[in-house]
Image (cartoon, rainbow, N blue to C red):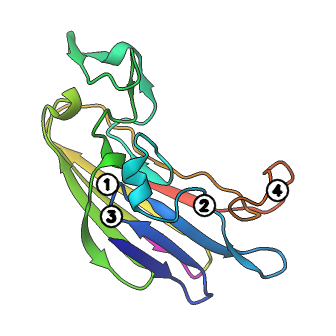
Amino acid sequence: MILELKNQNGLSATLTDYGQRLMALNLPDKNGKIDNVVLGYKDPKDYLKKEPNYYGAFVGRYCNRIAEAQFKMDDKIIKLTKNNTPNHLHGGKKGFASRYWDVLELKENTITFSGISNHGEEGYPGNLSITVKYTLTDNNVLRIEYKAHTDSATPVNLTHHSFFNLKGEGCGTIYDHDHILTLILFYL
């Protein structure tokens, strides 16, 4: 499902429920020309065909690599799914980037997704319920708020995995950027 957020200034963000992927963030440049500054695919089906990829995705239960796909907790070795041999990367084979999310709330400038990661999924202990709220503010800020609740000790390290080119997607390098893009992440 494709979902679009807009603010009163004409900025827009396009997301999909698959991996909560930010497919487009349309911002004006210094001359007022609006362009998509997020790198990724135009067709949401390409995210399914070209797995694994993390373009624009919500990543977890644990972003980054866990060496040897295991960790120690309470004197016990917890073994995780290996998907970046010999490591565990970005939540495993079926991490948060590779699933469909429920839409709890959709307004003109806000969307809230929710989901549950069950005990044992990809090897992680504990049930984890997650909500992620994206808001495109009238101050031209894309705000992402994460909330996670668990019923037992478990590692949680969530992030958003977009790549940006402030000149617009496919418009050269990023080496001479002089704009400021504000992406505020709240861990509540």
3D distance between C-alphas at marks 3 and 2: 17 Å
Q: At label 2, which amino acid type do we have?
A: Val
Label located before the other in sequence (3 or 4): 3
Q: Residue at x 32, y 71 (%)?
A: 1
Residue carrying label 4 = 177
3D distance between C-alphas at marks 1 and 3: 17 Å
What is the crowding at mark 3: few (fewer than 14 residues within 10 Å), some, or many (at least 20)?
many
Quarter location, residue 38:
bottom right
Of residues 93 and 10, the one drawn nearer to the viewer in this rendering: 93
Residue carrying label 3 = 17
Tag 1, which secondary structure?
A: strand
Q: At label 4, which amino acid type do we have?
A: His
User: Which circle, 1 or 2, is nearer the viewer?
Assistant: 2
Label located before the other in sequence (1 or 3): 3
Of residues 103 and 23, the one drawn nearer to the viewer in this rendering: 23
3D distance between C-alphas at marks 1 and 2: 24 Å
Q: Residue at x 66, y 64 (%)?
A: 37
Instruction: Spot the residue most to the bottom.
Output: 8
3D distance between C-alphas at marks 4 and 2: 14 Å
Tag 4, which secondary structure?
A: loop
Residue carrying label 2 = 38
User: Does the image show residue 39?
Assistant: yes
Does 71 appear in magenta? Answer: no
Label located before the other in sequence (4 or 2): 2
Tag 3, which secondary structure?
A: loop
Boundaries of the magenta span: 134-138
User: Does the image show residue 141?
Assistant: no
Disc sitting over residue 147 in the figure: 1
